[in-house]
Image (cartoon, grey):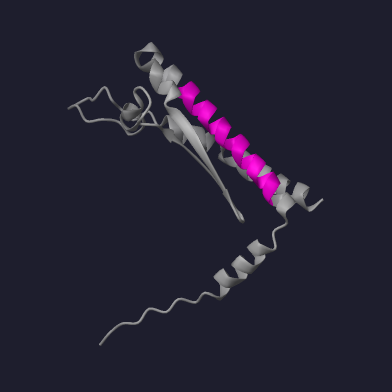
Amino acid sequence: MVDRIVFETDEIERLVIHLFQVPSKIMEEVNGVTKTTTLAIQRDARASVRWSQGARLAPLVNAIGYDLRFGFGSAEGEIGYDRDKPQGNLGHIIEYGGSTGYNSPNAPQRNLANALAKNRDDYATNLRKAFYRGLD
């Protein structure tokens, strides 16, 4: 006997229809809010790395970069360590920690995660405001 999996796509289809109806002014506002928040997260993460690592890993601060992607009905910002920049390949150790034995000096710093958490509520609030500005 073969189990059959059925997906109901009615809600997804309705969402797609609604996304096609999103006024372009709203998306312009959302894109602006996404860019501003992405830059704020990058700035906060860099400040956190600068504070937690000091001069020891100074180039790592500049290895934190971002990418923005805007599409039809979508806006996305991605912040992270660029492995091609000086010390960028150490970003994962700083963020998630490293294992060098008992009482590791490389405990997770969570600089990116903390910067995201710090800006999350503002992003949600500003998205709501952007939506209403876009309706005007």
Quadrant for residue 98, please give it. Answer: top left
Frontmost residue, 104 versus 33:
33
The answer to whether residue 87 is above or below residue 71 is above
Total marks placed? 0
Tell me residue 127's x, y (percent).
Answer: 66, 46
Quadrant for residue 109, please give it. Answer: top left
Magenta residues, start to end: 27-48
Residue shown at 62%/35% (left/top)?
A: 36
Tell me residue 69's x, y (percent).
Answer: 54, 45
Horizontal side, residue 53 vs residue 30: left or right: left
Q: Residue furthest left?
A: 101
The answer to whether residue 80 is above or below residue 53 is below
Horizontal side, residue 123 vs residue 94: left or right: right
Horizontal side, residue 52 vs residue 119: left or right: left
Residue shown at 51%/30% (left/top)?
A: 42
- Can see residue 111? yes
Residue shown at 64%/68% (left/top)?
A: 17
Q: Quadrant of the N terminus?
A: bottom left
Q: Main secondary structure of the magenta part?
A: helix
- Can see residue 125? no
Q: Residue furthest right?
A: 136
Tell me residue 41's x, y (percent).
Answer: 53, 32
Residue 66 lies within the magenta run = no
Tell me residue 88's x, y (percent).
Answer: 36, 27
